[in-house]
Amino acid sequence: MFKKILIANRGEIALRVICACKELGISTVAVYSDADRNSLHVRFADEAICIGPPRSSESYLNIPAVISAAEITGVEAIHPGYGLLSENANFAEVCETSHIKFIGPRPEVIRLMGEKEKARQAMKGANVPILPGSDGVIGSPEEAAEWAAKIVYPVIVKASAGGGGRGMRVIRAESELENLFNSAQTEAAAAFGNGNLYMEKFIERPRHIEFQVLGDEHGRVISLGERECSIQRRHQKLLEESPSLKVNDELRQTIGKKLEDCLSEIGYSNAGTVEFLMDEDGSLHFIEMNTRIQVEHPVTEMVTSIDLVKSQILLAAGQKIAEIIPKLDRKGRRGHAIECRINAEHPEKFTPSAGKIRAFNVPGGLGVRVDTAAYAEGVIPPYYDSLIAKLITFGSNRNEAIMRMRRALEMFIVEGIHTTIPLHRRILADADFQAGNFDTKYMERLLARMQQEREQGAELPA
Ligand code: MV4
């Protein structure tokens, strides 16, 4: 087992990794920027090293600075968290050359999944359901027109190097194709240095459902079931839950088994998330895979009782799935969990809200979990992701998790900066949310309704 790990991240996820290390008896090294000198990941790590100025590009994303910190402190492994360097295959490779274990899949596997069209073909070859679409990247608007005729409009072109919504265009008729194809290509080339595009059938009102997987370094991969992530705005998730109301035991089993077979074939190791779109008929279609631990991992932890971050560390140390996860936990799921992302943002305008937190009261009690690195009198710097806390509730069923979340949101106090807490209170009080009646367009509809209500003088629940 590792004796010492460096955490190449900040905020709540850096603290989450420190928690896992403490429970495993591993000592920790934090890295921090000048803006994070007083942050809790620095305070709770055994050692801390400043790696540069506030901007991420000069600190948390500075590979030589991170590797130097790792070498100076003599760590055996680096946990990248999410975002930042977590899906950077080059960084994983530099770790390898420096004889430091990167806690994640092998660089080749990160690279494969980063090329969305290749990932799609790999899943197709292993019988994981995909949407009708092009085989490989599309060379020209003429070729795109041929594919679109075969797939049937509406279609969507996506950047092969993209993900998370950039470099995508929905095409509804052949007359629009040439312009939209060319603009997607230009945007992809500028954003990712690679203009490769591929095409899929467009689903109008999908639900976003993702599967958590874990793989060991001995060829075994297990699926830990799904998370429902449709409550999002502009590709930023706001609320996630597990299980999904739309996934029954049979579908969960079928998809899980296919993923296990496909990913063990690829040699996938460590934690990963496989994203699907659910169409109006309730069928799941693979869209992309993320090769990191995700923000919303706690909802899976709550319903499986598996510590995913501890698992990541044990798997990276070479342990087998069979050694670290009891058989009952691999199969059994219990209850229902919901996560609300608390962002330092205006709850209606979504503008970032940096500054000093004046009052901070975190709810507790049975079935309530808060993952955060924020504290009273602490400063939220303007340079980074706006996530300041994750409020997770667990209940024996969805209704209990909802009622628990509503009382926990009532008791969550953050003063001095704006947060999305009032927005979450509104979502949890909404009849459509409560009925499970939503898709990825839900927030657009809710925000439009809230706008109307404001024009009639209503306000967000305090
Ligand atoms: C789609 C789609 C409809 N049809 N693909 C957006 C981000 C990227 N990960 C995939 N995305 C989508 N791909 C097909 N064939 C609709 C979206 C989409 C979306 C997906 C998941 C969560 C939120 C979304 C919001 C808008 C569009």
Image: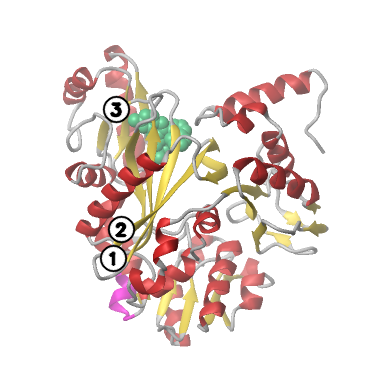
Quarter holding residue 53: bottom right
Q: Amino acid at mark 1?
A: Arg
* Mark 3, secondary structure of its residue: helix
Measure how far apart labels 1 and 3 are at the Cα level.
Answer: 34 Å
Quarter holding residue 145: top left
Q: Which x, y percent locates residue 406?
A: 73, 43
Q: Which mark is residue 182?
A: 3
Please give left or right for residue 377 compared with residue 155 in the image: right
Residues under numbered marks 1 and 2 in contact, where contact means CB atoms less than 8 Å apart: yes
Q: Residue 256: within the magenta?
A: no
- Tell me the magenta residue range: 93-99
- Please tell me whether mark 3 or mark 2 is closer to you in this view: 2
Up-down: is 168 above or below 417?
A: above
Count of picture labels: 3
Which residue matches tag 2? 110
* Mark 1, secondary structure of its residue: loop
| The N terminus sits in image quarter | bottom left
Residue 121 in view, yes or no: yes
Is the residue marked by circle 3 packed among few (<14), some (14-19), or many (20+) residues within 10 Å?
A: some
Which residue matches tag 1? 106
